[in-house]
Image (spheres, coloured by chain):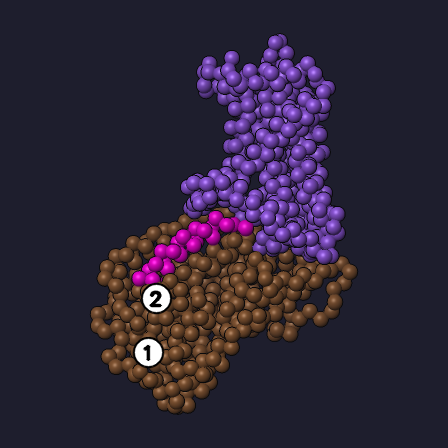
Amino acid sequence: MGIYEIIMDTLVFIFATNPFSPWIRGVLGGLVIGAVFAGALVMVYLERKFLGDMQSRIGPNRVGGRFGLLQLIADAIKLFTKEDIIPAKADKWLFIGAPIVALTSGFLMVAVIPFDYLYINGNYYAVAVSRMDISILYLEAVSGLAIFAIFMAGWGSSSKYAVLAAFRNVAKMIGYEIPMGISIISVAVMAHSLDIVEIVEAQSSIWFIIAQPLGFVVFFIALLADVGRIPFDQTEAEEELVAGWATEYSGMRWGLAFFAEYFHAVVASFMITLIFLGGWNGLPIVGNLYIPGIFWVIAKVIIVMMVFIWIRAALPRYRIDQVIDIGWKVLIPLALLNLVWSTIIGLMWA
Amino acid sequence: MTHEDTQITSPPKPSEILLHLGPQHPLQPGPFVLDLKIEGETIREAELHIGYIHKGMEKVFEDRTYLQILPLTDRICYLASNSNNDVYCRGVEELLGIEPTDRAMYLRVLTNELCRLQSHLLGIGEFTTDVGFLTMFIYMVREREGIVSLLEAITGSRLNHNYARFGGVANDLPPGYKEMALKILGDVKKQIKSHDAMMSSDSIYCRRTKGVGVLTAKEASELGVAGPPLRATGVEYDLRRMEPYLVYDDLDFKVITQTEGDVFARVKVRFLEMLESIYIIEQCLDQMPSGPYKQDVTPYITRPKPGEVYSRIEDPRGEMGMYIISDGSDKPYRFRIRGPAFATSQALPPLLLGGYVADVAAIAASMDSCTSEVDR
């Protein structure tokens, strides 16, 4: 038994003996949010270095050694010490609230994300802050909160660029939450459960990316649009809308908004990993060597992040009307087709 | 069609917003204001305001001696500094009644084409950032680096080269230049072809650019647009062919045209023109005659006989002309510049009508205007 299992054993022991203690849940929640927070930092760093490699430039290379490891800390210090400007005509509470809501919706999503599924003393325990029967619906619902944040920011900033970005975002989300929801339902149909842990366990023999590739493609594109990355970053298209909904933000408020985006991107990577890439189910390439499930989860999350960055390096940006066309005319029919497919296969599987 | 046709006269309706784009905005190469009346994302009316960095260059030139004007012509537009030097020098040479030496003519063609190459590379690069394709911008700047180093090896500076002189050029080629140039140009040619193929085959890029901002040949000629935007409409108008200056008569090259007149065609023209420029440079290096690179006697104080001259050149951006009137003194009596970017800027508002806000970036960047030259 390795150190990892001892730690997990202790955690799970405390968790299992005292399942309703808010303190235990609070501590675990803090740990998990910290882990995803660290994931977002890793993503920012990867975005700079990996994107730099693909664009034949170096990326950060001064602060913290030649790999620029402390660049993020330097940025954070800069953002914290900058003047906090609230525009005179802004709706103050909406303006202040928007980055908080954006980050909060990310935090809420983390609550149901399982990192591993441990078998200890004859029982299975999911390493998650909260295990719900309908966790995937919860995830979908909470991720929708981020739209409010962008709309609050857009409306509260009293800037035309921000308002345009907020309009774009709402239009985009209406078109893309639907195919995303339908492809999640397809997965749930195949796994016979709305619980993410059950969904991952259902992939122990075959991952859903192989069982329903169409669903994966639809889900991936919809998720890209959801987190607003190129080619779907119309809400912060620099050359059109300056910085989109974050135009009027400065200092740490802008930092929070920026960080919330990366937080959402990391949670999106987790969603893809868990729902389509088999979560903690490893590849059968390493024989009898025991590799903890959390390793697989993190490795897959990092690969998904790198794919996000790769897409950013390789593609230009769609125009907003084209984005909405794709959502309604391509993704929704494909998602419905995939629902039919997964229902048939799911019934045969059962 | 005139500038008055695209003025915003009425206040916006309740369903419309007046978007005041500029004078500082990420899509702009320099300060100008684009007032857009938009309904949702659709542009209903557009109006362009220029003059934020007006420098009064033409008036300044009337107060400088002919030699003092020469370095200032670089500053009209730093991306076309060689062309500007050349067109000015040819004007003054005509007034003085002298001719540059053969070798100087080849050197000027060589630097003009290098100048066109680096201008097009940066122009396409800026365009790609405006459609959200940052990677291609960095690739373009990487390719441009080689071209700029070639210019630096001849002229001694990376920007504002100030290379042409009355009756010649400032200095000769450095030793070993031909080998170095052929190597760098070979690499750049390969990369340009690969970037062109990559962009033309990208479905998102094609959807963003094909059929967007269509300029017809008639509109283009009414608005005085020349250069790549005009050739993209199918008009085979290139001063290098229509009115061959320097040694373009002896060189073999194609005039690149496309027929669509949209954003895609304009960028495609630039891509193909770069390949032609490389071909011209290769010919120049092969055919370069030996001999002096400048006239033996160049007067220190230039006093042309009274008279007037209009010299023009195919600039990277279009047709650049300079009209000089001499009254026999050492300073021009009247100086007038006809810039290509002014005409392409003028064509911008009509192209935007009916388009989307997102198209502003693509169309403006595909016209490859230069505010520094518009507000000269």
Amino acid type indicated by mark 1: Phe
Chain to which mark 1 belongs? B
- Pick whichever of labels 1 and 2 is earlier in the sequence: 2
Which segment did they paint magenta? B132-153
Q: Nearer the viewer, residue B168 or A245?
A: A245
The residue mark sitting in front, 1 or 2, is 1
From the top left corner, tell me how far across and down residue B66 is, in percent: 38, 81
| Farthest right residue in view | B14
- Residues at marks 1 and 2, CA–CA distance in whole angstroms: 16 Å
The quadrant holding residue B353 is bottom right
Disc 2 crowd, CA 10 A, few/some/many (<14, 14-19, 20+): many
> Could you say whether the residue bearing mark 2 is in a helix, strand or loop?
helix
Residue denoted by label 2: B111
Chain to which mark 2 belongs? B
Query: Given contact means CB atoms under 8 Å apart, are the residues at marks 1 and 2 in contact?
Result: no
Q: According to the rendering, which colour does chain A have?
A: purple
| Farthest left residue in view | B290
Q: Nearer the viewer, residue A73 or A180?
A: A73
Residue at (53, 36) in percent of width and height: A42
Q: Is residue A197 above or below residue A323?
A: above
Quadrant in which the N terminus of chain B is drawn: bottom right
The quadrant holding residue B213 is bottom right
Q: Is residue B346 above or below residue A89?
A: below
Residue B166, label in figure: 1
Q: Is residue B304 left or right of residue A54?
A: left
From the top left corner, tell me how far across and down residue B281 is, in percent: 32, 62
| Farthest front residue in view | A81
The answer to whether any part of residue A50 appears in the image is no
Q: According to the rendering, which colour does chain B have?
A: brown
The quadrant holding residue A274 is top right
Main SS of the magenta part reads helix
